Each structure stands twice: as structure tokens, then as C-alpha cells.
Image (cartoon, helix red, strand yellow):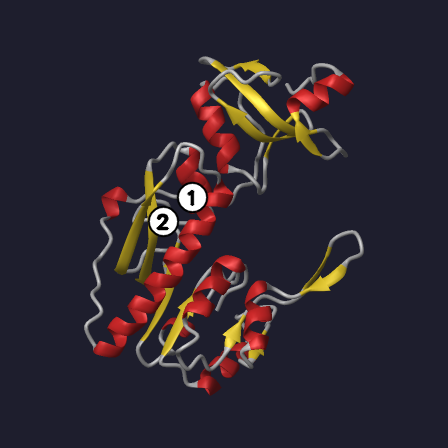
């Protein structure tokens, strides 16, 4: 069960397994032409001749009956985008597991990769866990860590973690086959959360380091913003031609931005044609 390319990497890793079905979110029109686009998971599943199911919800009996008919040993959920009612968790013969983009119990929730960068973390990772009724609260099976580099963005870290997630899912499946998959309860005192990103506005009263982390943590999506401008890249060090902004502590140099209705460009190119932008 998955939808975006983060999930497609995990499906690809299971190419040697008997994947009896794929559940992914319904197709949606995108772009100016509103062309219907398949999810990365659906595209991959179709090339492998794996049955694809796209229910609008998992709350009705039709979706549950479809899963039940497949008689799964294991249900693997990776960035699906739909909430699984409790009865699904008890359905598979072996387990219902999830691949999550953090080192649980840190960063439960929808935006763990972004939040780790925003918070200035230097290490993060992925883990597999048993799914329970409470979000991301199940026992951890396996975990793998990776360093967060100084110039990492959400995009670059996402791409590393999706491959780690694919590896760890395959290892987890092998452990279940061998009958020796470990499970480690999460320490409730160490729980932190990463809720969905709903506000992209930069708070310039924060330090330059905090704003820098915020910009790279939201790039390339949904992208940090200020006064209508999207801020694509910045530096803590002086960059010739960049836009210098005084923050609550220190200076930040905006190197790439996008004006409302415009295209992404270097700050130097923008200022040559428009002068110094008012970004807040």
C-alpha cells in the first residue's frame, strides 16, 4: 500500500516476492492541462502485472473485502496517504507493517524528513514497525540511520531515505520468512511529532541558521515563502550577488528565489532586472 516515489522504491525492492496486490490512491488530474496522472506506485505495478486497487476510502466493506480476497501474509504500508482502520491491522497472516522516514520514536507523523532538517538534526533514518491503532506507535522491527549533510534539502534526503526504506523493507520481509523478526517497543518519553506542513512562511525573527534549515527543509516542496516569493536556496556564508537578509541572529544570503507568477532564478539575475525584492 503506497502512492509516491518513496513507496515505489519499496515496491521495486519486493520484485522477487509474490506481491499479490497493490493499493494506491486514486488517479488525479494534474498540471495546467489537468491530465490524469498515475501514481509512481501504480505505474510500477502495471509494468509488473500486479493487480492495482484504488479505493477512495478504506472505511467501507468493498475495500476491506478486496484486501481480504487477496489473503495476504504481509501488508506493507509505505506513504500510502489513506488511514487504515483497525480491522486491516489484524487481517494479514503474519503482520501489517509500515516503513517510516525517521528513527522512531522521534518524528511520528506526516512530515518526518522535513522536520528533521528544520530542527537542525544531524542524523535521521528509516525504520520498519508493526502498525497499531495509534499513529506510528508500534514496535520497531529494524532501523537504518544516515547523516544529514550541511547542504541536504528535503529532496536530497528524501531520495536517500527512500532507498534505505526499500532495503530495510526487504530485510524485514526476510526476517519474517525466517521467523525471527525482532520487535522493540518505543520509548514513550522520547516521542516527538512531525505534523503536516501547513504554513511555509519564513519567520525572520529566528536566527540565520534556523531560517537556513527551514528553507532547505521545505525544498523542493512545498518551498519556504516570504511576501509571495518562494525561497529555493540560501547560504550562511556571503555569496556574491545574493540577497542579504538580516535575521533575528546573523545574516542569511538568499541565492535562488521565485517571484509570484514567475520562474525560479538566481537572486542576482532577479535583482538585475527588478531591483532588490521586498521579501518581508
Q: Considering depth in this image, is 225 or 45 the residue closer to the camera?
A: 45
Nearer to me, 197 or 168: 168
Give the residue displayed 55% in from the left and 74% down from the top: 45
Q: Position of residue 17 (x, y in %)?
A: 39, 79
Is 178 located above or below residue 228 in the figure?
below
Mark 1 in CB contact with mark 2 (< 8 angstroms): yes
* Residue 24 place in picture, x, y as percent: 55, 68
The quadrant where residue 207 appears? top left
* Residue 131 in view (yes/no): no
Give the total of numbered labels: 2
Q: Which residue is mark 2?
A: 102
User: For mark 1, what is the residue?
Assistant: 194
SS state under label 2: loop
Residue under the image location 49 percent in, 79 percent down: 21
Rendered position, 211 above or below 216: above
Q: Position of residue 5 (x, y in %)?
A: 53, 59
First in residue order: circle 1 vs circle 2: 2
Q: What SS does tag 1 mark?
A: loop
Q: Is residue 221 visible?
A: yes
User: Is residue 57 left or right of 278 when viewed as pictured?
Assistant: left
- In the image, farthest residue toward the front: 240
Where is residue 41, by image quadrant? bottom right
Front label number (1 vs 2)? 2
Near mark 1 (Cα within 10 A), the count class, few <14, some 14-19 or many ≥20, is: some
What residue is rendered at 42% in x and 50% in y?
160
Residue 193, image x and y in percent?
A: 38, 43
Q: Say whether residue 10 is left or right of residue 177.
A: right
Label 2 crowd (10 A; few <14 / some 14-19 / many >=20): many
Amino acid at each position: 500500500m503506497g502512492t509516491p516515489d518513496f513507496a515505489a522504491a519499496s515496491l521495486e525492492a519486493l520484485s522477487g516476492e509474490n506481491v499479490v496486490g497493490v493499493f494506491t490512491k486514486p488517479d488525479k488530474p494534474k498540471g495546467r492541462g489537468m491530465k490524469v496522472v498515475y501514481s509512481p506506485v501504480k505505474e510500477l505495478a502495471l509494468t509488473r502485472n500486479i493487480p492495482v486497487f484504488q479505493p477512495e476510502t478504506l472505511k467501507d466493506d468493498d475495500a476491506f473485502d478486496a484486501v481480504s480476497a487477496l489473503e495476504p501474509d504481509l501488508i506493507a504500508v509505505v506513504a500510502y496517504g489513506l488511514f487504515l482502520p483497525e480491522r486491516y491491522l489484524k487481517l494479514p497472516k503474519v503482520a501489517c507493517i509500515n516503513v517510516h522516514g525517521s528513527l522512531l520514536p522521534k518524528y511520528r507523523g506526516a512530515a518526518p524528513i522535513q522536520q528533521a532538517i528544520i530542527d537542525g538534526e544531524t542524523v535521521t533514518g528509516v525504520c520498519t514497525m508493526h502498525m497499531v491503532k495509534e499513529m506510528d506507535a508500534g514496535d520497531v522491527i529494524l532501523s537504518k540511520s544516515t547523516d544529514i549533510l550541511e547542504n541536504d534539502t528535503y529532496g536530497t534526503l528524501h531520495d536517500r531515505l527512500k532507498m534505505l526504506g526499500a532495503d530495510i523493507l526487504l530485510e524485514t520481509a526476510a526476517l519474517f520468512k525466517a521467523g525471527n523478526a525482532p520487535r522493540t517497543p518505543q520509548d514513550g518519553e522520547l516521542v516527538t511529532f512531525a505534523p503536516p506542513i501547513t504554513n511555509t512562511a519564513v519567520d525572520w525573527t529566528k536566527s540565520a541558521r534556523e531560517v537556513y534549515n527551514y528553507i532547505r527543509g521545505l525544498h523542493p516542496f512545498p518551498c519556504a515563502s516570504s511576501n509571495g516569493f518562494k525561497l529555493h536556496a540560501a547560504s550562511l556564508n556571503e555569496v556574491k550577488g545574493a540577497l542579504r537578509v538580516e535575521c533575528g541572529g546573523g545574516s542569511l544570503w538568499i541565492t535562488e528565489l521565485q517571484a509570484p507568477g514567475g520562474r525560479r532564478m538566481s537572486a542576482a539575475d532577479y535583482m538585475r532586472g527588478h531591483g532588490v525584492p521586498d521579501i518581508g
